[in-house]
Image: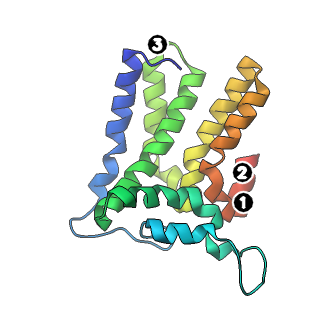
Amino acid sequence: MNFSRGRLIEFGIIALWGLCPLLWFIPGHLIVGVDLHVPVDLERWGRQIWAWNELWGTGFEWSVGFSNLVFSGVSALSSFFIHDLRALEQTFFVFWFLAPGIACYRLAHELKPEPERWDFRLSMTNFYMFNLYLQALWGGNEAGLSAYAGLPLVLAFYLRALKTRQYLRYAFVIGLAGLILSASSMNLPLMVVALA
């Protein structure tokens, strides 16, 4: 995917769309739900790395959130630079609203790479980013957000592997893209969808 002037304009439009979650915030309030937690700071995130369960004397239990390292790492890394909790949560929302857009754009570019098909790429990306009904079906939780962001990317790399016949290379790239899907391993049905 070469970055011509047209592609940069398309990315600029997607980046503007990615700022839409900022409209959801009421001044002086945070958005907190059962599955959408307050963003994790670096200290708390670091404690998730240790996966030893003292009660069992082995391994870890699911409540440790070990599979959530990449997902919660976004807010943990941001907390290193942003100290205001509200601004941190806004950054978190913008990232996880923008990530599916970038992934879908990559898929749309794989389907229609011709420069004159910018309308297809932007329409597909816009529909995927703003289809909040589809997002609600995924549950709006950590596992759903990571699956929603990662699946178009996995499909794009799969199609690329079929076109180029570089299966081993793209198997590795799909594995890296699977890191985005790592939070979906907390939810077995989503993991099955991701692997299917």
Amino acid type of the residue that numbered disc 2 sits on in the rendered structure = Val
Kind of element beneath mark 1: helix
Which residue occupies the foreground of this view, 113 or 43? 43
Amino acid type of the residue that numbered disc 1 sits on in the rendered structure = Pro
Question: Does 112 sit left or right of 30 as displayed?
Answer: right
Which residue occupies the foreground of this view, 130 or 182? 182
Mark closer to the chain start, 3 or 2: 3
- Point out residue 23 in the picture as x, y percentages from the top left corner: 27, 53
Distance of label 3 from label 2 (alpha carbons): 32 Å
Q: Which residue is mark 3?
A: 115
Distance of label 3 from label 1 (alpha carbons): 38 Å
- Point out residue 190 in the picture as x, y percentages from the top left corner: 68, 57
- Point out residue 160 in the picture as x, y percentages from the top left corner: 67, 24
Q: Residue at coordinates 31% horizontally, 38% vertically from top-left? A: 16
Q: Which mark is residue 189?
A: 1
Q: Residues within 10 Å of mark 1 (few under 14, many from 20)?
A: few
Question: Does 121 sit left or right of 165 as displayed?
Answer: left
Which residue occupies the foreground of this view, 17 or 175? 175
Q: Residue at coordinates 47% horizontally, 34% vertically from top-left? A: 125
Question: Does 134 sit left or right of 64 as displayed?
Answer: left
Distance of label 1 from label 2 (alpha carbons): 6 Å
Kind of element beneath mark 3: helix
Q: Which residue is mark 2?
A: 193
Mark closer to the chain start, 3 or 1: 3
- Point out residue 57 in the picture as x, y percentages from the top left corner: 78, 82
